[in-house]
Image: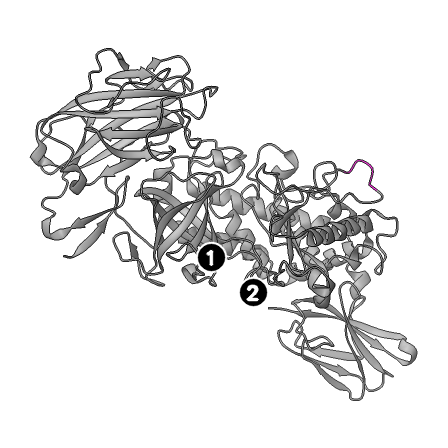
């Protein structure tokens, strides 16, 4: 038999076209939360078979729903309890005209629902029979009092045919709080039916009601089915994910076959402060049928098994992360790849999301050595570590401070976390090594001779990565920059042995999208300079004249190259064009335009206003940075010669030709990077030299600014020229 998928604001279902019969003409609501319900506060067991139609509930109390306490969303207020049990009898008079049903439950914190004694829905509750005095399996906040629609569960025709009857029916719900000390409990229940003709029998649907969903999109569509399970913060649950991506220029229909991924995943919610938003972000692992890791190339990104579904919510442009990561990649550094998509979970349309690569060691992500448990000595011990500075989660492996000697006055210690490998995966010798290395690195920054190229911080840190890390975070004035969401990794000694700042992460509270820190709201000021709040590393680096000069030269190079005002305007407009259609559906689902969502500084009434604010804020920031960048680039590059040497093309991509005036007594050329580190050194035997953009080891150098030095006998400098390698 041929099957076709349909979706609604409820649950995924299959409809056999050969026996489907009529389709739904319209929806009506049979049971409202505001009707009279029988209820039993959970101070004791409600009775055997309380959820069945035959149960006698005459000893139960009666009141109008919702029934609960706290939040001001209850018509019948009860004393604090761990649970409440509800029953509602209702009559169906046109059973032959009802095709499907939708159950909406607005709850805090978990529930189980029964129709005529059969379970039809469960969320944030443990499996099996749940006692009256048992808490929920997680935290869930009610939605209606916040202006959002409650979650819907579709009861499809095949199931409904065995449950809903002509005449009297019974809806029974048990709602459980997380614990007896909770400040609120909510139980608001609605039951609606899909009618196959235009007759009217019951009540109109609520204003927030949305019937079966079907749409097409210019974005990929990600469909997740959790098989009735709620998605907790921890542990992960097993679910199915399908991705519809028909290719460039081809629209994606929700009823299309899965074309990019169709398989098992594990999933959990993720985030810190964002956990309180109704639109949740998720961590996803693609898996084989047996639960082992399956590396999948999702939406054109390199194959891997760990992914993030990021939910833009307080960032109403929905692009701050994407814009920042794109900039990081354009600077020549690995930064998480992204793809926009529209997401449907259990047929609940969740809006626009960003599918992102999770930061981890991988040849296509953070490309460093894979540290094995047996790597406890020699070169193998020295690299393969990804570390993080972030908020401390009670479930994380204990962080450490690696306190420097000496300490700096009024500077706080930095709490470091093992990230990949995790603290549990590392063995004692590896944990000891990286802790000692980080203590030595921090001590090199606090020492009086910290600017020394041999013994100071440059011995430990890759300076270009630190420069780029600062510049991107400062362009965005990321409120979490230099404080949280800071990643760094260490190479093996055989690969240079340095620490690298990055990859970049977490820019949702950037580009002016914050109201609680004045320095982060407006264009003037440096985020790294906020003493007592941000990590001291960055302030200390900029106190080194050579670092400040390098940052000034990098900024000048970028602004004279691709990083123009138009770069940002074009990027923002391009992303906004891609999102123009889907943002409308997103803000129908989450009607937050024109309303405050923590921590908005600007509240646009329309999506276009949000985009215009982002553009204007960014342009103002660039002007301020142009006028206030520390350092002196001329100290590095010197004065451009008018005679004596010609270089072309400059800027260059792969190779550059150097033509030296034969009248100059040049014995040697040397090309250095911005930190004064030698890249190549060659004796001059011909007036024309071609540099292929590789260093003396044969490795292609990254894009950036370099200095060509012309040296005479005894390495006496004659002239120097600025060379620019571009992407």
Given residues 568 and 499, the one toward you in this image is: 499
For the stretch drawn in magenta, the main secondary structure is loop
* Residue appearing at x 64%, y 74% in the figure: 652
Left or right of 575: which side holds 89?
A: left
Asked whether the viewer can see residue 222, the reply is no
- Residue 251 in the image, given as x and y percentages of width and height: 30, 58
Left or right of 137: which side holds 531?
A: right
Quarter where residue 405 is shown: top right
Pointer 1 local density, CA inside 10 Å: few below 14, some 14–19, many at least 20: some
Given residues 310 and 163, the one toward you in this image is: 163
Given residues 291 and 209, the one toward you in this image is: 291
Disc assigned to residue 363: 2
Reply above or below: 92 against 412: above
* Residue appearing at x 51%, y 57% in the figure: 337
Disc assigned to residue 305: 1
Q: Secondary structure at mark 2?
A: loop
Reply above or below: 444 against 181: below
Left or right of 502: which side holds 154?
A: left
Q: How is the image coloured?
A: one colour
- Residue 715 in the image, given as x and y percentages of width and height: 89, 76
- Residue 711 in the image, given as x and y percentages of width and height: 85, 77
Reply above or below: 170 against 96: above
Disc assigned to residue 185: none
User: Could you tell me which quadrant the C terminus lies in?
Assistant: bottom right
Q: Which residues are magenta?
A: 407-411
* Residue appearing at x 33%, y 23% in the figure: 187
Left or right of 4: which side holds 721?
A: right
């Amino acid at each position: 038999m041929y099957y076709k998928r349909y979706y609604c604001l409820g649950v995924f279902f299959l409809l056999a076209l050969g026996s489907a019969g009529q389709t739904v003409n319209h929806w009506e609501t049979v049971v409202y939360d505001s009707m009279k319900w029988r209820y039993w506060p959970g101070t004791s067991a409600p009775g055997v078979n309380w959820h069945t139609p035959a149960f006698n509930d005459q000893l139960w109390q009666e009141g109008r729903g919702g029934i609960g306490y706290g939040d001001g969303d209850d018509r019948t207020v009860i004393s604090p309890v761990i649970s409440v049990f509800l029953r509602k009898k209702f009559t169906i008079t046109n059973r032959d005209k009802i095709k499907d049903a939708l159950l909406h439950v607005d709850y805090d914190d978990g529930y189980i629902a029964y129709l005529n004694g059969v379970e039809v829905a469960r969320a944030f509750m443990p499996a099996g029979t749940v006692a009256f005095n048992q808490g929920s399996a997680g935290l869930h906040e009610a939605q209606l009092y916040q202006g959002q629609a409650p979650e819907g569960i579709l009861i499809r025709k095949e199931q409904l045919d065995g449950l809903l009857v002509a005449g009297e029916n019974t809806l029974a719900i048990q709602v459980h709080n997380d614990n007896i000390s909770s400040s609120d409990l909510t139980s608001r229940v609605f039951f609606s039916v899909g009618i196959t003709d235009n007759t009217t029998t019951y009540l109109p649907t609520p204003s927030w009601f949305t019937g079966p969903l079907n749409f097409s999109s210019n974005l990929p569509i990600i469909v997740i089915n959790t098989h009735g399970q709620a998605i907790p913060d921890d542990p992960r649950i097993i679910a199915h994910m399908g991705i519809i991506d028909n290719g460039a220029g081809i629209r994606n229909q929700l009823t299309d076959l899965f074309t990019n991924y169709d398989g098992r995943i594990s999933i959990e919610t993720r985030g810190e402060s964002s956990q309180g938003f109704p639109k949740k972000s998720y961590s996803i692992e693609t898996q084989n049928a047996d639960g082992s890791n399956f590396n999948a190339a999702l939406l054109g990104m390199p194959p891997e098994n760990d992914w993030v579904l990021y939910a833009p919510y307080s960032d109403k442009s929905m692009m701050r992360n994407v814009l920042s990561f794109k900039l990081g990649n354009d600077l020549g550094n690995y930064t998480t790849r992204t793809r926009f998509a529209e997401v449907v979970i259990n047929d609940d349309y969740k809006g626009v999301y960003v599918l992102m690569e999770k930061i981890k060691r991988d040849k296509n992500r953070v490309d460093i050595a894979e540290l094995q448990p047996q790597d406890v000595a020699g070169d193998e011990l020295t690299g393969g570590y990804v570390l993080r500075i972030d908020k401390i989660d009670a479930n994380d492996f204990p962080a450490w401070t690696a306190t420097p000697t000496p300490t700096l006055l009024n500077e706080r210690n930095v709490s470091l976390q093992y990230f990949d490998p995790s603290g549990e995966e590392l063995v004692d010798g590896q944990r000891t090594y990286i802790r000692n290395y980080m203590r030595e690195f921090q001590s090199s920054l606090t020492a009086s001779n910290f600017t020394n190229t041999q013994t100071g911080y440059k011995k430990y840190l890759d300076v270009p990565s630190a420069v780029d890390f600062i510049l991107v975070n400062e362009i965005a004035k990321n409120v979490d920059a230099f404080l949280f969401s800071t990643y760094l990794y260490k190479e093996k000694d055989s690969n240079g042995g340095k620490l690298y700042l990055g990859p970049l992460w977490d820019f949702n509270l950037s580009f002016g999208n914050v109201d609680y820190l004045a320095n982060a709201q407006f264009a003037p000021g440096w985020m790294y300079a906020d003493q007592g709040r941000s990590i001291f590393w960055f302030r200390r680096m900029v106190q080194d004249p050579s670092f400040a000069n390098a940052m000034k030269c990098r900024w000048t190079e970028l602004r004279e190259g691709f990083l123009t005002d138009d770069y940002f305007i074009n990027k923002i407009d391009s992303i906004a064009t891609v999102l123009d259609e889907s943002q409308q559906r997103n803000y129908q689902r989450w009607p937050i335009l024109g309303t405050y969502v923590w921590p908005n500084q600007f509240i646009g009434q329309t999506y276009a206003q949000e985009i215009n604010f982002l553009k204007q804020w960014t342009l103002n920031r660039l002007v301020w940075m142009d006028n206030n960048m520390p350092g002196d680039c001329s100290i590095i590059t010197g004065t451009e010669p008018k005679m004596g040497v010609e270089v072309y093309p400059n800027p260059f991509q792969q190779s550059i030709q150097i033509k030296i005036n034969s009248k100059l007594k040049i014995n040697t050329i040397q090309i250095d990077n911005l930190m004064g580190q030698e890249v190549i050194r060659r004796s001059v035997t011909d007036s024309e030299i071609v540099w292929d953009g590789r260093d003396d080891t044969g490795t292609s150098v990254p894009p950036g600014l370099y200095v060509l030095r012309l040296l005479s006998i005894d390495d006496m400098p004659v002239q120097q020229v600025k060379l620019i390698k571009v992407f």
